[in-house]
């Protein structure tokens, strides 16, 4: 009896096991068929979209690259200042012509039609940035011989204060009218209240509502050009420089500008840089894609650390900028505008007058130069005091 009972259990278990495996194989087959059908339908639906993506991916990537580099902010309302409106009404024809003309070969430029059109459409809206802080009456009651335009940032209050006490002091050269202006954009992460307070105290800050970044240095310089052309066109000379510079204002005026022959028109000088090539590797601080500048070499330009020009040049650069596609490298962009205007760079009397690097300090060395780079506020104050004490001992 026992063997028969056990045999029945074994056979019964075998039947159950066989039934279980047969059912699972069917289930797997069913899942496989359903999955295959879903995959087939997905392929049918997605293949056209994938093909379309690869077809348009190249121009999209080019456009994205350009927009990342341009850093343009929102379009703004028209300026309240009637003088600004008057200036741009006079240049309306230039704006219309630049937006209506097809891309043409001009000089050696061979910018692609699509890239140039995209840049130009954005660029037409550059100038309507409005002044948040303005010193429109700065030149009303006086005509400066020299106007100092100093590019600065929000967190550089110590730099500005040191400059006010040294080379930017408006009485630094007795009997000569000098005006200083610090140029700022907007820092969206920081309240503007401190800048407004500083402006009310010193009346030497101008600010427009573009975002204050390295990529927007050209906008900052164009703001200065706009201010000169609109509010101080009777000044004799303008110097654009940076807040980390030492500037020997007295030597600049007495040894350089007083010797410029009349008429003081179309004059532009500084540290002239020649033979520089665009950086094509994207990690470079000065990266320049071919879509924005296709040439293999930049034109000769004056380093943005410090250049000097006759006031009429500001108006010509500003007018020309309405038609020259935007580049974020400010000194290169200014050079392109000068080239289109037919203005040649004037070499300084000595190559060591304008310096793009830090010059080792000695009173007599600094007594006979115009600029030195990367000077901290405390160092500037120290250098300036020694220079004032010792300059009479220098030949």
Image: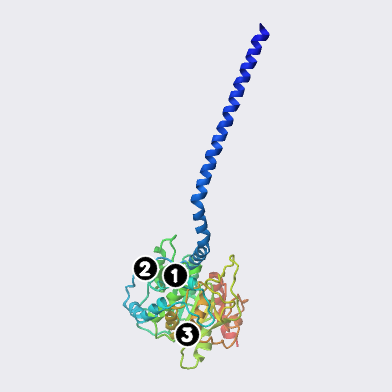
Among the two numbered marks 2 and 3 on one chain, the one whose residue lies closer to the N terminus: 2
Residue 151 seen anywhere in this rendered image of the structure: no
Q: Residue at x 43, y 70 (%)?
A: 122
In the rendered image, residue 337, in percent from the top left (x then y), is placed at: 48, 81
When the figure is inspected, residue 17 is found, relative to residue 182, above or below; the finding is: above
Q: Residue at x 58, y 66 (%)?
A: 282
Q: Quadrant of the C terminus?
A: bottom right
In the rendered image, residue 362, in percent from the top left (x then y), is placed at: 62, 79
In the rendered image, residue 188, in percent from the top left (x then y), is placed at: 43, 61
What element does badge 1 sit on?
Answer: strand
What element does badge 2 sit on?
Answer: loop
Q: Could you say which disc has been placed on residue 21 in the image?
A: none
> Distance between the Cα atoms at labels 2 and 3?
28 Å
When the figure is inspected, residue 69 is found, relative to residue 295, above or below; the finding is: above
Among the two numbered marks 3 and 1 on one chain, the one whose residue lies closer to the N terminus: 1
Q: Residue at x 57, y 85 (%)?
A: 392
356 or 214: nearer the viewer: 214
> Distance between the Cα atoms at labels 3 and 1?
27 Å
Eye-nearest disc, 2 or 1: 2
Q: Residues within 10 Å of mark 3 (few under 14, many from 20)?
A: some
Q: Residues within 10 Å of mark 2 (few under 14, many from 20)?
A: some
The image quadrant of residue 87 is bottom left
Q: Which residue has dot 1 on it?
A: 184
Q: Residues within 10 Å of mark 1 (few under 14, many from 20)?
A: many
Q: Which residue has dot 3 on it?
A: 341
Taking the view exactly as shown, the residue that stands out farthest to the top is 1
Q: Which residue has dot 2 on it?
A: 76
């Amino acid at each position: 009896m026992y063997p028969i009972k056990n045999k029945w259990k074994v056979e019964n278990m075998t039947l159950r096991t066989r039934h279980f495996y047969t059912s699972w194989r069917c289930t797997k087959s069913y899942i496989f068929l359903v999955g295959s059908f879903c995959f087939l339908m997905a392929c049918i639906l997605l293949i056209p979209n994938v093909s379309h993506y690869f077809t348009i991916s190249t121009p999209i990537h080019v456009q994205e690259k350009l927009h990342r580099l341009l850093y343009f902010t929102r379009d703004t309302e028209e300026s309240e200042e009637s003088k600004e409106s008057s200036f741009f009404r006079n240049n309306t024809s230039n704006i219309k012509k630049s937006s209506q003309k097809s891309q043409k070969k001009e000089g050696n430029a061979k910018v692609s039609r699509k890239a140039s059109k995209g840049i130009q459409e954005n660029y037409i809206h550059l100038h309507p940035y409005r002044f948040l802080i303005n010193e429109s009456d700065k030149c009303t009651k006086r005509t400066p011989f020299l106007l100092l335009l100093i590019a600065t940032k929000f967190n550089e209050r110590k730099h500005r204060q040191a400059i006010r006490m040294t080379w930017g002091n408006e009485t630094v050269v007795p009997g000569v009218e000098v005006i200083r202006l610090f140029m700022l954009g907007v820092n969206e992460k920081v309240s503007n209240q401190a800048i407004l307070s500083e402006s009310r105290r010193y009346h030497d800050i101008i600010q427009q509502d573009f975002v204050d970044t390295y990529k927007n240095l050209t906008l900052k310089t164009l703001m200065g050009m706009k201010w000169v052309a609109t509010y101080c066109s009777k000044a004799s000379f303008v110097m654009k420089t940076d807040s980390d510079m030492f500037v020997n204002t007295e030597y600049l005026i007495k040894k350089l500008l007083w010797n410029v022959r009349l008429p003081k028109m179309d004059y532009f000088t500084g540290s002239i840089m020649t033979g520089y090539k665009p950086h094509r590797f994207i990690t470079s601080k000065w990266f320049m894609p071919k879509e924005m500048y296709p040439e293999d070499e930049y034109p000769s330009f004056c380093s943005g650390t410090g250049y000097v020009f006759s006031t009429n040049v500001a108006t010509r650069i500003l007018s020309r900028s309405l038609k020259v596609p935007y580049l974020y490298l400010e000194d290169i962009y200014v050079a392109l505008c000068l080239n289109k205007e037919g203005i040649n760079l004037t070499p300084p009397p000595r190559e060591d007058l304008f310096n793009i690097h830090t010059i080792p300090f000695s009173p007599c060395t600094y007594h006979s130069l115009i600029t030195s780079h990367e000077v901290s506020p405390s160092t500037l104050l120290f250098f300036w005091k020694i220079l004032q004490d010792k300059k009479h001992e220098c030949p």
